[in-house]
Amino acid sequence: MNRKIIVTIGIVVVLLGAYLFTVNVEKDGPTTVDSRNIKQLVSDYSLGSIENQSASITSQELIVTDTDDSESIYDLPEDEFFVSIAPYVDKTHPCATHSLTGCQGEMIDKEFSVYIEDMEGNVVLDQTMKSQSNGFIDLWLPRDKEYQITFAHEGKTSKSDFSTFENDNTCITTMQLTENKSA
């Protein structure tokens, strides 16, 4: 009987240790949040709805830094890629990893005609969109694809190719709008 008690206690100790180890490892790793909530969290940072934190977004993770420099990392959806684009006329900045709380584009609260198609010619987006107070337009697109995007605003356009593969840029600041040339 004593042997069964000792074996049972041993199993409980091993299971408890495994549980505590797993909890500590998960604290240090990325946090999983469902895709609807992570998109809302990204939007809240992008719109400036959350203060006293900075946030940047890679092709795989949302990284939030508190004022005490502690970081929280959230996994992005496996099937969707976030990209933020700031069309411009005169001023831009170089950027690869978008800072949701720091990047500032030139064209604030402007309406654009946005047209995106994939390389097979399928229309992914064709609508009027308004840039945010940071001058960017945020998009969630299918991962692992190549696209061509066209922005149009008040007779000026810009066209560019981009892709949504792992480690691709989440910030595009190279789309200078220029006058349309008539044929």
Image: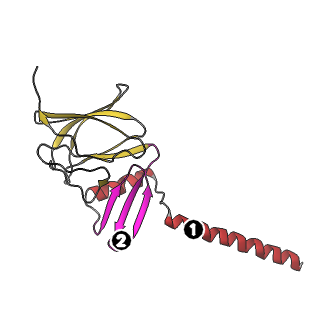
Rendered-image quadrant of the C terminus: top left
Q: Quick one: which residue is furthest to the right in this view? A: 1
Q: Residues within 10 Å of mark 1 (few under 14, many from 20)?
A: few
User: How far apart in space, not on screen, are marks 2 and 1 (Cα)?
Assistant: 22 Å
Tell whether position 175 is magenta: no
Which residue is labeled 1 in the image? 23
Q: In the image, which is nearer the foreground, mark 2 or mark 1?
A: 2
The percent coordinates of residue 56 (x first, y second) are 33, 57
The percent coordinates of residue 182 (x first, y second) are 9, 23
Q: Are marks 2 and 1 in contact (CB under 8 Å)?
A: no
Tell whether position 75 is magenta: yes
Residue range in magenta is 51-79
Q: Residue 14: in sight, yes or no?
A: yes
The percent coordinates of residue 27 (x first, y second) are 51, 67
Instruction: Name the mark on residue 13.
Output: none
Rendered-image quadrant of the N terminus: bottom right
Instruction: Name the mark on residue 69.
Output: 2
Q: Secondary structure at mark 1?
A: helix
Q: Which residue occupies 33% across, 60% down?
A: 55
Q: Nearer the viewer, residue 155 or 1?
A: 155
Q: Quick one: which residue is furthest to the front in this view? A: 94
